[in-house]
Amino acid sequence: MHIRKKEETIAEDAKIAKSLLSRIKGLMFCRKLKKGEALLLVNKSENINESRIHTFFVFFKIDAVWLDSSRMVVDKKESIMPFTPLIKPGKPARYILELPAKASRLIKIGDVLEFTKDI
């Protein structure tokens, strides 16, 4: 799946994690994300508690971008260190986009991202 901000590509190879197990696993024990890769975690509804993430057993820095149901960016954190126990958004979110470190530098709160696939 591709993820874009207007005409700019954010990720050309985004994997989707919708099931409870795939969301819990996330990027644990995965190889480092390459440029253009991402993981999109999908919650059933917008909320803060289900939108919390951690980087236990993620052996590289990541950026995290939280989006609401309309795919508008509600929060973001850059260069999250490995083994960080709890990272949560400031506002409720339905989607969490995990990207390589520094890949979210052009994304701002309030931006609306486009997915090339319905979820």
Image (cartoon, helix red, strand yellow):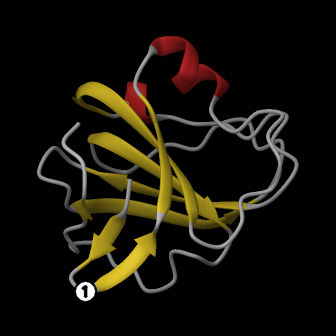
- Camera-nearest residue between 1 and 67: 1
Residue 72 in percent (x, y) is at 19, 61
Give the quadrant of residue 92: top left
Q: Is residue 23 above or below residue 86?
A: above
- The residue shown at (76%, 33%) is 28
- The residue shown at (15%, 44%) is 69
Residue 51 in percent (x, y) is at 42, 34
Q: Which residue is mark 1?
A: 7
Residue 50 in percent (x, y) is at 40, 25
- Quick one: label 1, few (<14), some, or many (20+) residues within 10 Å? few
- Camera-nearest residue between 62 and 90: 62
Disc 1 element = loop
Q: Quadrant of the C terminus?
A: top left
Residue 91 in percent (x, y) is at 29, 48
Give the quadrant of residue 112: bottom left
Q: Amino acid at mark 1?
A: Glu
Q: Residue furthest left?
A: 70
Left or right for 57, reference 33: right
Q: Is residue 107 above or below residue 91?
A: below
- Camera-nearest residue between 118 and 104: 118
- The residue shown at (50%, 34%) is 52
- The residue shown at (25%, 66%) is 113
- Camera-nearest residue between 66 and 41: 41
Left or right for 115, reference 52: left
Left or right for 48, reference 92: right
Give the quadrant of residue 25: top right
**Number of residue marks:** 1
